[in-house]
């Protein structure tokens, strides 16, 4: 604090401390505390209370349907019970007179003295019905009787449903009271992890470790070569060659690899042109190897820069002395170069591992559904597909804890401290 006050003065030091507090508290501590609190609250979507709530909702819909059927049946019964209205003019609709029939164009109406009246007075044979009968009651009396029986059955069903609803409501109240008295926080979100998800979690840690090793193997020779270049021009050229491709957005770089590794992509086109593969080329994105390759490419700079930083401070006289004493190339690197580069290796390994373990873009875009899932995909589905934020928070904290354990293991293995890495 004294150094800050002497360097920046009181007002600027206050602003710096305020910004650091807002950054740590608002951007780091608050989200982690919220996620930790959610992870300790277990929400069982298949417990007895949830099943009771679902049963009440279903029964409410059934009662509403019964009410609708009752109203419709009672209305139909009332319509059948009404007597037919009489014709005030004494001319029925079936009368052959010219009172009020429906005239079809071109149809002749017989006159009163027409001899055809005798034929008209003779009742015609009943015509066949247009549609067959499916067992409906032919008379109004039977229809009314059947409707009365149907209404009685519906009322009986509704009474049984109301009694069941009362029982369920009482059970719901008891379960709500029991849940209110139960302890709010537990570790059930961590202990109830599915075996498949636990297997994916372990594999993801191994995958991220493998990506870290690949990045180190690729970056170490380049970093050592760049640190041996004399003059700023050579090192600057190497730096530009590394930085310029990574000025493109990460999504574009991932999609570029997708187009390269696709079945009809650039790689298979070149292999087909030279005759290495036939008409049925391999699907490179159908395995985790392509994910490892794309991740190592995406995060290679996070391993390269710490290595170049530490190897640039290596005293070359130590390498020359080891060679003069007869040490082989492998022994020189093992006994001289690598021990000096430990802080850079540790820093690069920590960053690459954490990015690889938590990445979602690469496994989602590179051969999605064709290779084994990563744990980050499982977390994404818990949050956004199933909406289970409590379980997703527990899974996220598990991944964070594994990253912290990895950091401690790396610091212990390389015997370096945070202060040495910060240099």
Image: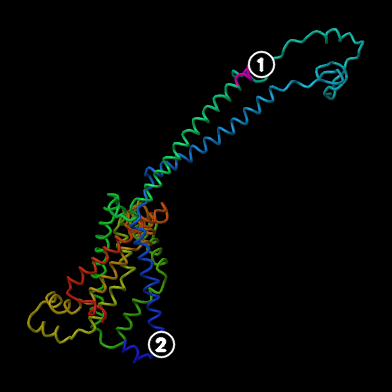
- The picture quadrant where one finds residue 277 is bottom left
* 122 in the magenta segment: no
Instruction: Work out whether residue 123 can be spotted.
Output: yes
- The picture quadrant where one finds residue 406 is bottom left
Residue drawn at 29 percent across, 77 percent down? 305
Task: Look at the magenta stretch and give its main secondary structure.
Answer: helix
Q: Is 274 situated above or below 144?
A: below
Q: Residues within 10 Å of mark 1 (few under 14, many from 20)?
A: few
Decide which of tag 1 and tag 2 comes sooner along the chain.
2
Residue 396 in the image, given as x and y percentages of width and height:
33, 60
SS at circle 1: loop
Q: Is 182 situated above or below 216?
A: above
Q: Which residue is disc 2 drawn over?
A: 12
Q: Which mark is residue 399?
A: none
SS at circle 2: helix
Q: Which residues are magenta?
A: 137-146
Q: Is 55 situated above or below 298?
A: above
The colour scheme of the drawn protein is: rainbow
Depth check: 243 or 149 in front?
149
Q: Residues within 10 Å of mark 2 (few under 14, many from 20)?
A: few
Residue 377 in the image, given as x and y percentages of width and height:
36, 57
Instruction: Work out whether residue 268 can be spotted.
Output: no
> Total number of numbered labels?
2
Depth check: 311 or 76 in front?
76
* 143 in the magenta segment: yes
Residue lying farthest to the right in this orientation: 113
Alpha-carbon span between mark 1 and mark 2: 98 Å
Locate residue 188 relative to residue 388 in the image: left or right.
left
Residue 194 in the image, given as x and y percentages of width and height:
30, 49
Q: Which mark is residue 139?
A: 1
């Amino acid at each position: 604090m004294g150094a800050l006050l002497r360097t920046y003065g009181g007002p600027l030091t206050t602003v710096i401390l305020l910004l650091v507090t807002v950054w740590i508290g608002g951007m780091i501590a608050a989200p982690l505390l919220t996620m930790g609190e959610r992870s300790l609250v277990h929400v069982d979507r298949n417990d007895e209370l949830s099943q009771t709530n679902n049963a009440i909702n279903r029964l409410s819909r059934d009662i509403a349907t019964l009410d609708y059927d009752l109203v419709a049946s009672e209305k139909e019964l009332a319509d059948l019970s009404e007597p037919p209205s009489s014709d005030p003019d004494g001319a029925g609709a079936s009368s052959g007179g010219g009172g009020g029939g429906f005239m079809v164009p071109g149809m002749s109406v017989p006159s009163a003295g027409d001899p055809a009246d005798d034929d008209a007075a003779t009742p015609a044979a009943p015509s066949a019905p247009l549609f067959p009968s499916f067992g409906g009651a032919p008379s109004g009396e039977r229809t009314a009787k059947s409707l009365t029986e149907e209404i009685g059955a519906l009322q009986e069903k509704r009474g049984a449903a109301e009694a069941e609803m009362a029982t369920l409501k009482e059970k719901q109240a008891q379960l709500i009271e029991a849940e209110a008295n139960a302890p709010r926080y537990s570790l059930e979100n961590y202990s109830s992890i599915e075996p498949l998800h636990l297997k994916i979690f372990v594999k993801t840690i191994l995958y991220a470790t493998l990506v870290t090793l690949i990045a180190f193997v690729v970056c170490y020779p380049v970093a050592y070569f760049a640190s041996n270049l004399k003059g700023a021009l050579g090192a600057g050229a190497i730096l530009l060659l590394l930085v310029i491709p990574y000025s493109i957005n990460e999504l574009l770089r991932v999609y570029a690899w997708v187009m390269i590794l696709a079945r009809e992509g650039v790689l298979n086109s070149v292999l087909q042109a030279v005759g290495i593969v036939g008409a049925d080329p391999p699907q490179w994105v159908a395995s985790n190897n392509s994910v490892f390759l794309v991740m190592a490419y995406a995060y290679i700079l996070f391993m390269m820069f710490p290595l170049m930083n530490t190897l640039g401070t290596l005293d070359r006289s130590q390498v020359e002395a080891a060679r003069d004493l007869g040490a082989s190339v492998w022994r020189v690197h093992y006994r001289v170069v690598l021990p000096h580069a430990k802080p850079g290796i540790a820093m690069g390994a920590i960053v690459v591992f954490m990015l690889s373990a938590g990445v979602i873009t690469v496994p989602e875009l590179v051969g999605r559904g064709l290779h084994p899932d990563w744990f980050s995909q499982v977390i994404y589905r818990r949050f956004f597909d199933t909406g289970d934020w409590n379980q997703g928070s527990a899974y996220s904290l598990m991944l964070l804890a594994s990253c912290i354990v990895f950091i401690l293991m790396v610091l212990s293995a390389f015997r370096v401290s945070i202060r040495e890495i910060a240099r």
